[in-house]
Amino acid sequence: MATKRDYYEILGVSREASEAEIKKAYRRAARSHHPDANPGDHGAEDRFKELTEAYEVLSNPESRRAYDTYGHQVPRGAGATGYPGGEPFGGFEDIFEAFFGNRFGGGGSFFGASTAQRPSRGSDAEVEVEVSLREAAFGIDREVNVQVVRNCEVCDGVGGTESHVCPTCRGAGSVRTVRESILGQMVTTQTCSACGGRGRVIDAYCDNCRGSGRVSEVQTRRLRIPEGIETGMRLKVSGAGHAGDPGGPVGDLYVRVKVKEDPELLRDGEDLIHHMKVSFVEAALGAEVEVPTLEGTRPVRVESGTQPGATLTLRGEGMPRLRRRGRGDLKVVVDVMVPTRLTAEQRELLERFETVSGEETYNGGGGSFFDRLRGVFR
Ligand SMILES: [Zn+2]
Ligand SMILES: [Zn+2]
């Protein structure tokens, strides 16, 4: 490796520069030298790495003092990077994100596997909850039981009650490899294999979690099923999923909703359909019948001469709209029942009815049987 340049020189600040001046200088220089802002320019990568290294050292008062005293020849063993207190940040990517956010698309191309440094997020949990149509219509508070993995509280997710800092990664949980290649210096970061990324080596395993650092438990969550919900919709409860690595974010819980079919009310989006059976006599004479609704039952008048398949619309008695005002309609479809078994007396009465009936008996409601036949054969 070539002789290292002076860190103050790299950042273009004086040796007396304040922390704020150092930060400002780094921010300005990092923007123009960031590899993603200079595609194909390998010199930019090197300048950026040099810059970041200089900033890492000078932004931390302890490591800056060590650098001021020893220069680049800091005694080994003083910390993970040779500076007391170790690295001020997790690495290049972290330091860059701390300044600029993740707006260079994660920097994955340049930084490689360095995401392994951050404790990973827990996975999402999913659970299904079944509700009745009426519960789906008006909403309901429900308790759901979720089996989740969380970090053991006895050992704080480490897996051991006694442990020491991993000598391989010096507690960082990851190791950085600097490799010279024809493209310049390549820095890759990998999870430390000696400690599995925990940063600590375990001497006495935790009994509570049998060394895994994780325990599984059933958690009861109370949540609101909103009115108007439909089968297949998912509710999200942030942070109620599985635990991630110690210090990492917890996953989310998704509650998949299933609305049970109702024996009387068929759902059609916002509308409801009820098939109402009436006898052919009721259809002919007219009748008052009870219709099931979401709220209970209500009387509905079937007019005399109601035809099979006729639909009565009860406005605003359908499903409430999800996150909107108003409700759909309840459509009552009339199914006319025709007798299948007649007594001698019933048969006689119907035969008498037939002898006194003619074409005019069926006029009205949709035309007579004979009219319809004529329509076909004309
Ligand atoms: Zn390690
Ligand atoms: Zn434990």
Image (cartoon, helix red, strand yellow):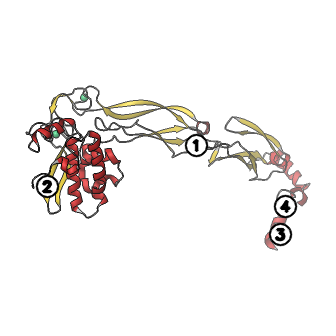
Instruction: Please name whichever residue, 116 or 320, is drawn nearer the observer in this view of the structure.
Output: 116
Q: Amino acid at mark 1?
A: Glu
Tag 1 and tag 4, C-beta contact below 8 Å: no
Q: CA distance from mark 3 to mark 2?
A: 93 Å
- Residue 22 x, y percent position in the rendering: 26, 44
**Dot 2, crowdedness within 10 Å: few (<14), some or many (≥20)?**
few
Please give the label number shown on residue 261: 1
Q: Identify the element where label 4 is drawn.
A: loop
* Furthest-bottom residue in this view: 378
Q: Identify the element where label 2 is drawn.
A: strand
Instruction: Please name whichever residue, 376 or 352, is drawn nearer the observer in this view of the structure.
Output: 376
The mark that comes first in sequence, 3 or 4, is 4
Q: Amino acid at mark 4?
A: Ser
Q: Which of the 4 image quarters holds residue 359?
A: bottom right
Q: Identify the element where label 1 is drawn.
A: loop
The mark that comes first in sequence, 2 or 1, is 2
Residue 260 drawn above or below residue 156: below
Q: CA distance from mark 2 to mark 1?
A: 63 Å
- Residue 119 x, y percent position in the rendering: 28, 40
Task: Tell us which disc is closer to us: 3 or 2.
Answer: 2
**Dot 3, crowdedness within 10 Å: few (<14), some or many (≥20)?**
few
The mark that comes first in sequence, 4 or 2, is 2
Judge whether residue 202 can be spotted in this image: no
- Residue 211 x, y percent position in the rendering: 21, 32
Q: Which residue is mark 4?
A: 368
Quarter holding the N terminus?
Answer: bottom left
Task: Tell us which disc is closer to us: 1 or 4.
Answer: 1
Judge whether residue 69 can be spotted in this image: yes
The mark that comes first in sequence, 3 or 1, is 1
Q: Which residue is mark 3?
A: 374
19 relative position to 272: left or right: left
